[in-house]
Image: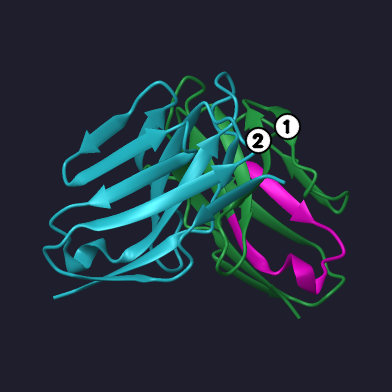
Chain colours: A green, B cyan
Amino acid sequence: DTGVSQDPRHKITKRGQNVTFRCDPISEHNRLYWYRQTLGQGPEFLTYFQNEAQLEKSRLLSDRFSAERPKGSFSTLEIQRTEQGDSAMYLCASSLASGETQYFGPGTRLLVL
Amino acid sequence: SQKIEQNSEALNIQEGKTATLTCNYTNYSPAYLQWYRQDPGRGPVFLLLIRENEKEKRKERLKVTFDTTLKQSLFHITASQPADSATYLCALGLESDSWGKFQFGAGTQVVVTP
């Protein structure tokens, strides 16, 4: 399968713990995006990368959140000192820089107790 | 304030009929608009894109219209099938040279019954 993959698919953690999610985009895609989606809402843009450069971050991305894409391939999203309000589905998507279509992964569902 | 509004109530429709979904927006000037399908527990899947200078786009049984004066897009599924049951999201692309910076609506659930 050459689609976008995310790991883990589910994560349960206690408040205050750190969590890290991984996204592997489609191999030839140089843009990678992170979104957060809560129940009954659409995905909210968090940040995106072109190759290894993080080009934009949403105001939603507090300083507890950090994303990296060190070699321009896979990306990680880390949440430090998790809060119950961080419980959501975290979606990753990728696209070609000139493309009009984003391909989404299956998401990582986070539950903070 | 900026808003993207989609029907919050589920659309229940009989197989074979046409489902019509709306996406209204305020205080945005999108360069393009996209529609995605999302099944429970899965990521959205791209369906159609329409640019600000286009009135209508079609793909198989799907049709999208875009009226920048009314600030509205309509999404039609013709000859609907139970397999079309899902949540449909509209997404506004806000910058013509920054593909990928989307603002999503909350989505409308469609339920097609045999």
The chain identifier of the residue carrying mark 1 reads A
Nearer-N-terminus badge (1/2): 2
SS of the residue under disc 1: strand
Amino acid type, mark 1: Glu
Residue range (magenta): A74-90
A27 left or right of A86?
Answer: left
Where does the image place residue B97, in percent across and percent down from the top left? Answer: 57, 18
User: Which residue is at 46% across, 56% downward?
Assistant: B43
Q: Which quarter of the rendered picture does the C terminus of chain B lie within? A: bottom left
Rendered view: A90 above or below A92: below
User: Which residue is at 55% across, 48% downward?
Assistant: B104
Using the image as rendered, state which of residue B94 and residue A66 is in the foreground. B94
Q: Are marks 1 and 2 on the same chain?
A: yes
Amino acid type, mark 2: Tyr
Crowding near pointer 2: few (<14 within 10 Å), some, many (20+)?
Answer: many
User: Which residue is at 33% across, 28% downward?
Assistant: B55
B95 left or right of B49?
Answer: right
- The residue wearing badge 2 is A48
User: Which residue is at 34% across, 64% downward?
Assistant: B86
Rendered view: B27 above or below B38: above
Where does the image place residue B40, in percent across and percent down from the top left? Answer: 42, 68
Q: Residue furthest front?
A: B70
Magenta includes A75?
yes
Alpha carbon separation for disc pair 1 and 2: 6 Å
**Is mark 1 in CB contact (under 8 Å) with mark 2?**
yes
Where does the image place residue B48, in percent across and percent down from the top left? Answer: 34, 38
Where does the image place residue B60, in percent across and percent down from the top left? Answer: 16, 42
Magenta includes B13?
no
Q: Residue furthest bottom?
A: A113
Mark number, residue A56: 1
